[in-house]
Amino acid sequence: MTKNNELTTIQKTELTQTVNRLFATKTPAKFIKTRPGAGGKPVRYVEVGYIINELNRAFGAFWEFKVVDKQVGKKQIWVQGQLTVKDYKTNFTITKETFGGADIKFRRDTGEVVDIANDLKAAVSDCIKKCASMFGIAADVFFKEQQLYDEMPTVVDVENGTRESLLRIVQQKYFAVAKKLGFEGEDAKQKAKKRYQVESFNDISIEDLTRFIEEMEAFSGDEGGQTP
């Protein structure tokens, strides 16, 4: 039993070291692209092909992405996805879960949807990139201030030896509480962004988001009230 526990600990350490190395690796400039964002501000991004290549380089064939939920709205699509990496010797795994989204494209002349399948693929690609960034791949691109992110309060999972940003944990709780109240994905993000007048959901502080969660939890226990 002791030997097995020691082996598992070694494999956990190796997997954790791989993730730490990914966080410490800067994305080569040649793979970073820009596109117009909200208000015409440039947004940096990398293509999903780069992300998949880096996942293969870091974890070989032992990673898996799956969509656990999705919704097609009138103008947007969002997906909830999980990215899991595994140590093949011990079957020890680490899973990260988050949301991705994409705008639905319409024909200018008729207003009909161009290709919903491509829009779904775009939402999945966005989700894969965001999940991968939580393992450190292109984290310096997707996190506006990587140094500030590194200095954020963190929680260490003793069971798997991984470090998780407290902000990410609070965000996941927010999505879970929001879903109980009937709004999720991009709608949940927009509600929080509107409340705190920020351009990015990640700009909402831990304190503000925690306060919003508490208000929503209080609302869920009352009847006849209005959504906060």
Image (cartoon, rainbow, N blue to C red):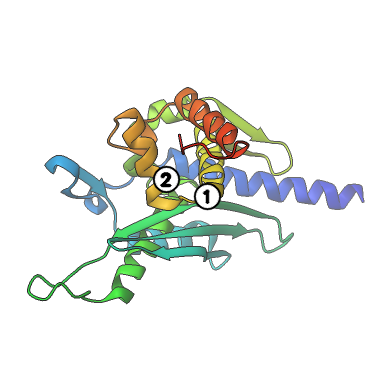
Q: Residue at x 56, y 42 (%)?
A: 177
Image location of residue 167, percent across then percent down: 50, 32
**Local crowd size for mark 2, using a 10 Å CA cut-off: few (<14), some (14–19), many (≥20):** some
Image location of residue 19, percent across then percent down: 54, 45
Residue 1 visible in the snapshot: yes
Q: Is residue 74 rendered to the left or right of residue 132?
A: left
Quadrant where the image shows the C terminus = top left
Q: Secondary structure at mark 2?
A: helix
Image location of residue 55, percent across then percent down: 46, 59
Closest to the observer: 210 or 35? 210
Residue to which mark 1 is pinned: 179
| Residues tagged 2 and 1 counted as in contact (Cβ below 8 A) | yes
Type of the residue with mark 1: Lys
Type of the residue with mark 2: Ala
Q: Is residue 107 rendered to the left or right of residue 80?
A: left
* Residue 186 higher or lower than 143, as above or below: below
Q: Secondary structure at mark 1?
A: helix
Q: Which residue reaches farthest right? A: 1
- Mark 2–mark 1 Cα distance, whole angstroms, equals 8 Å
Residue to which mark 2 is pinned: 188
**Local crowd size for mark 1, using a 10 Å CA cut-off: few (<14), some (14–19), many (≥20):** some
Closest to the observer: 45 or 106? 106
Image location of residue 62, percent across then percent down: 58, 65
Which of the marked residues, 2 or 1, is nearer the chain's N terminus? 1
Closest to the observer: 117 or 110? 110
Q: Residue at x 62, y 49 (%)?
A: 15
Q: Residue at x 43, y 26 (%)?
A: 205
Give the numbered dot on residue 71.
Answer: none
